[in-house]
Image (cartoon, rainbow, N blue to C red):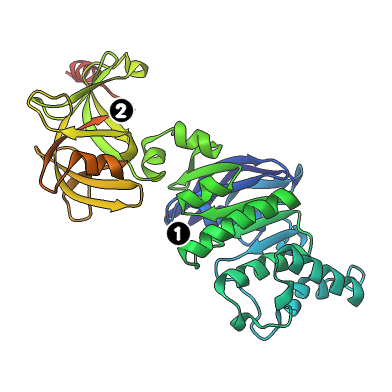
Amino acid sequence: MSIEIRNVSKQFGAFRALDDVSLDIESGELVALLGPSGCGKTTLLRIIAGLEKADAGSILFAGADTTGVHVRERQVGFVFQHYALFRHMTVFENVAFGLRVKPRGQRPSEAQINEKVHALLNLVQLDWLADRFPSQLSGGQRQRIALARALAVEPKVLLLDEPFGALDAKVRKELRRWLRRLHDELHVTSIFVTHDQEEALEVADRVVLMNAGKIEQIGSPQDVWDHPASPFVYGFLGDVNLFHGRANEGSVHLGGHLEGVSLDSPEHSDARDARAFAYVRPHDLDVQRYAPGAAGIVVRLSRAIVVGPIARLELMPVDGREGHEGEGGDRLIEAQIPAQQYRDMGLREGDTLVATPRHARVFVEAQTAAAADRAAAMAA
């Protein structure tokens, strides 16, 4: 079933949770709503489900306006972060619950319920736990039972709110692979909310990046990773270094006035001495020992973490002006190089190095210095 979200807004007191949000979801698609806490993703999910009412806008299922349709009539399955299983019921009874509370005319027979529940438990690979109670299950098993219960009523739309958020990292990784395989088998239109970038990129067909009640970008996982549409998207998707510089006629200069690096930026050929921000992922930084006159940003190796094949380097700029700001207020640059390269270079904490971006995404302030000068002249 396709879903159309049209100009949806929602306010809680003075807080604007959603601001004129529009989105199309194709039938059978698995879409992730991704963003930080408070960005509006869960509010949007609850409005789609009918658990929350929008102040403005509409929700259409397969072209039919469901804005005023009660949650019970929307044929939506909902999976919560904390399972919401009935503790006094067995696994079997939990999955059967939605079928047993259907109106008498729509309720399956006991034989049909028994067959369907066992089929669903087989689907989630937990048929052998049918007689257990939720307290006897692991977190990952409970979440799979919660998903089976949501699927029992044959929903047209499946909504998942941080479904793996309460689980440890290893179980979470296993379950998201399992969810992707299950979706490929069932093709139920599904929307899941997450703040975990890796989870969204690994599981979803498309990712919807949200921030401050608005959609920042929509695209495939590869597309939003390779072509982030805004500084927010670039900064939110994985680790990133932020460098400050100046853009002028298709070139961006980063670093101090004595040492630094210039990058080609043809997309900003119209810029005239404009303030620029360059985002560089840790694996896109080349690190070499310092030599006088070397092109790059001069740094000192503050800490090295070598785990498996990767060495993660924490670098402090010598002039203290580059890198991103940490919680302690200091500024550092993060780089990743092969562990073997780190060993071959014989690096030690305290060494002076040069960091050079191999690839950067540059954003330039909308108002260039020249434009500011013109505005000041007009005001005078």
Q: Percent from the top left, x then y, of residue 260?
A: 16, 26
Question: To which quarter of the image does residue 264 belong?
Answer: top left
Q: Percent from the top left, x then y, of residue 319?
A: 9, 37
* Residue located at (53% from left, 43% from top): 208
Question: To which quarter of the image does residue 220 belong?
Answer: top right
In the displayed structure, does residue 91 sit left or right of residue 12? right
* Residue located at (14% from left, 36% from top): 353
Q: Dot 1: within a 10 Å radius of its alpha carbon, few (fewer than 14), some, or many (20 or more) residues?
A: few
In the displayed structure, does residue 376 sit left or right of residue 154? left
SS for dot 1: loop
Instruction: Judge depth for marks 2 and 1 and give the one in front.
Output: 2
Q: Which residue is mark 1?
A: 13
Q: Which mark is residue 361?
A: none
- Residue 249 higher or lower than 360, as above or below: above
Amino acid at pointer 1: Gly
Distance of mark 2 from mark 1, alpha carbons? Answer: 47 Å
Q: Residue furthest bottom?
A: 88
Report the front residue among 123 and 20: 123
Query: Is residue 315 visible in the rendered structure shown here?
Result: yes
SS for dot 2: loop
Q: Which residue is mark 2?
A: 358
**Quarter containing the C terminus:** top left
Query: Is residue 161 visible in the rendered structure shown here?
Result: no
* Residue located at (33% from left, 28% from top): 359
Q: Percent from the top left, x then y, of residue 91?
A: 71, 78
Answer with mark 2 or mark 1, whichever residue precedes in sequence.
1
Amino acid at pointer 2: Arg
Q: Residue furthest front?
A: 344
